[in-house]
Image (tube, grey):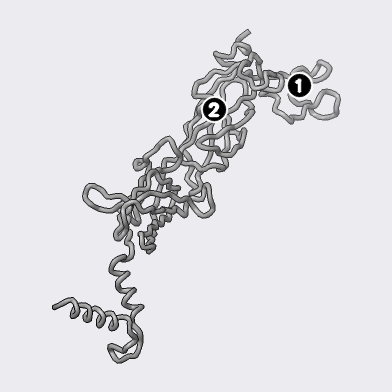
Amino acid sequence: MNLKSMILVVLVISAFVFSNCDCGGSGNNEITDISDTITDTVYPNPVIDFLDPVEGRSLNASDDKDTNQPLIQYDVVIKVQNVEIGQKATLLNASDTTSSSTGKTYTANVSKDSSGKYIVTFSKVTFINGANSLTATVKNLSGKEASKTIVVTAISDVSCTFEKPKNDDYLTTTDDRDQDITNGFQYNVQMTCVGVEVNQNAKLFINGIEAATAKVGVNSILFQNVTFTEGTNELSAEVSNLAGMKAKVDKIKVTVNTGRCLIRILSPIDGSKYLVKGQGENVILDKDKDAAGMQATLVAETAYEKLNTACGVG
């Protein structure tokens, strides 16, 4: 075929593609459909698959990648197809509303692993206790976008520990917050927590009686100016996470010795009514009916312990 014949063929093909003739008898111009077909072939739609974790997976404390942070931190890995290396992908945990009502978003770029898969790794994604709705989204160079959502459950270790004071600590007047022992002994109780979200309510108990309340901070609780009793104080606490799981808290015992000797009257019982001779009624508990007035025996108990010498014998 000579040059003149080739030019003629090209002109005929061009006329065929760009003319408005009805090649199939329908009378419609099919140029748009041809263009779409070519685009779909060159730039197919992206495809996303979650590799780890997968739909329905349950994460626990043993999966945590960073135990210094609250809740569970875990790497999320997705596989993508029809997406170029270096393209940005996003992961939204819509269930993690600790910092935003719309959830928490992570970003990472497409890379190729040793087996040739195109993957995206989102490092240390935070999983709240309970269900976590994860949505991955990616776009290729042609502008075509794909997304996929899965649900993963997480249950982290939920616990709190007394840091100050610690078990068996011995506190004296120098530990009193305001250095004024006349108004009692006050002390700041500090705890660290794992698996409990910020602003959760916490309660502190001393010897079984509620002594203070506080809001959970970042991995911590601070009960301010808590009043302790002289002698032994058994401390316990109650706090739960957003999912309603109660934190494990080990009780501790602390001794307070300010040099004061506290006394509790055992007998007579508070509110008892005593009648003395001459009131026209039977005399109750009068130890000496012939003596004027009421004669009674008082029984008291001190807060003496071996470490509290202010209430020692003698």
Give the mark nearest the N terminus, 2 or 1: 2
User: Mark 1 highlights which residue?
Assistant: 286
- Dot 2: what SS? strand
Q: What residue type is labelled 1?
A: Asp
The span from disc 2 to disc 1 (Cα, nearest Å) is: 40 Å
Tell me if 213 is positioned left or right of 15 in this view: right
> Label 2 amino acid?
Glu
**In the image, residue 273 lies at what x, y percent?**
77, 29
Please tell me which residue lies in front, 288 or 161. Answer: 161
Foreground: 164 or 66?
66
- The crowd level at tag 2 (other Cα within 10 Å; few <14, some 14-19, many 20+) is some
Between residues 294 and 267, which one lies in front from this camera angle? 267
**Whether residue 13 is situated above or below residue 235 in the rendered picture:** below
Q: Where is residue 125 in the image (x, y as percent from the top left)?
A: 41, 46
The residue that mark 2 highlights is 234
Q: Which mark is residue 9?
A: none
Residue 22 lies in quadrant: bottom left
Tell me the residue at 30%/71% (across/down): 38
Q: Please tell me whether mark 1 sits on a helix, a strand or a loop.
A: loop
Give residue 182's quadrant in the image.
Answer: top right
Image quadrant in which the N terminus is located? bottom left
